[in-house]
Image (tube, coloured by chain):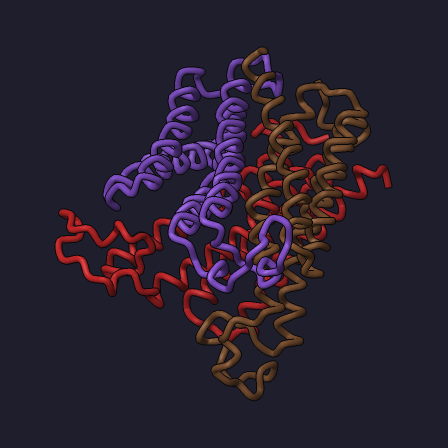
Chain colours: A brown, B purple, C red
Amino acid sequence: MASLRFDDPLFATYAVAATLMILKVIAMSWLTVVRMIRANGGFRSPEDLRRTPLNPHPSPAQLEPNDGVERIRRIQLNDLENIPFFLAAGFLYILTSPSLLAARLLLYGYVVSRLLHFLAYLTKQTHEVRAALWTAGSLILLYLTGRSLLAALGI
Amino acid sequence: MASLRFDDPLFATYAVAATLMILKVIAMSWLTVVRMIRANGGFRSPEDLRRTPLNPHPSPAQLEPNDGVERIRRIQLNDLENIPFFLAAGFLYILTSPSLLAARLLLYGYVVSRLLHFLAYLTKQTHEVRAALWTAGSLILLYLTGRSLLAALGI
Amino acid sequence: MASLRFDDPLFATYAVAATLMILKVIAMSWLTVVRMIRANGGFRSPEDLRRTPLNPHPSPAQLEPNDGVERIRRIQLNDLENIPFFLAAGFLYILTSPSLLAARLLLYGYVVSRLLHFLAYLTKQTHEVRAALWTAGSLILLYLTGRSLLAALGI
């Protein structure tokens, strides 16, 4: 069984993949902030229209959906539908004692698929490109989960 | 303390419940895709209206909310509000060394409550039915979390 | 390395912080329910307009967004963008064997930042107050994740 030690290559593989994915999600929050500042809008709460030092000239238009901000929010929602489950499934998967090569291909492959999905979504590629990259990640997630379920059932 | 070994019945109970819940969430993503294909709509991004081999006759109506697609999205959002926290709370709970019977009742009970909640939501049962099933799951989650907090406080 | 035993102060620190955050998220779901009952509205599904013992006088207005309900939903969405990742990053962080003092400051500091963020959002403080509290939590999360990544890379 994989230990939970960072000097165990299997656990380190998981920890690298997991932390990169968490950093990716955090980056989406910050990117939302950056785009709201740049657009001076895309806000969501009525109180965001109060006059403050950071918003000296409030206007109702600031509460309207902003394309650039909404795009990052859609990307982030897609992350929320996928990454928390990768964090759990990847953890269970390394406890099944896979080969280091398989673990690296699957976990780092997942990270790459999500980063490319982000780039495709950000740069407005066609639905097909985005869907193909999402599918690659989802199939890896399905495998990690299914493999762990079989191990738990003793199969 | 429960070990993190799949041949430990307590850990295996957690791993089975956790992977079933992850598979459930993945299934929601695929069901959304299936319904978008069947409805030929329910899309969310402007670039999804580009003419491509998979969307040869794009139309602005494809970006309008589609009832069938939105229903699965609401179910999935409800999953996001619940299942990631079950994955963490269930893990902490088995580390409190509960009896195997209690662990099975609670963790498998949670899984059953969420699957029934899904069926009730999908088949448009009344709010009461859906709420009762959600409540059952939420109370189990509350217990798992509270029990782990007490263990962590040494109570 | 931290053990996964509740009598290990490092693990207990994580378990207390994690369970408090999970309880916070569960509370948001229940608060949404309370506000929907009080407003007799803020529902989302067409079937919620059926006449039932709990909704004897249904009206289409019950499906319109309700300010008080939507506020809790926004708070909960913000939780979903943050707390699942804290649960994973905090777990990896305590496996890096930090000092107990550092762990307590960071993990309990995160909990406090999220509880204050909730209060600021609930009581409609200005965007600046809310943003400052969110930022404090996000920076802690960034540190926990970055520290774990460095440990996994052997740096």
Residue C7 falls in image quadrant: top right
Is residue B110 visible in the rendered image? The answer is yes
Q: Residue at position x 17%, y 49% from top?
A: C54
| Residue C151 screen position, x and y as percent | 80, 39
Work out whether B8 lies above or below A117: above
User: In which quadrant is the C terminus of chain B drawn?
Assistant: top left
- Give whichever of A66, C13 is nearer the camera: A66
A48 vs C140, left or right, is left
Q: Please indicate whether residue A151 sits to the left or right of residue B34 in the image.
A: right
| Residue C101 seen | no
Q: Percent x, y for residue A77? A: 56, 53
C102 and B143: which is toward the camera? B143
Query: Which residue is depicted at the point 61% across and 57% down?
Result: C137
Q: Quadrant of the N terminus of chain B?
A: top right
Answer above or below: position of A146 versus A128: above
Nearer to me, B24 or C126? B24
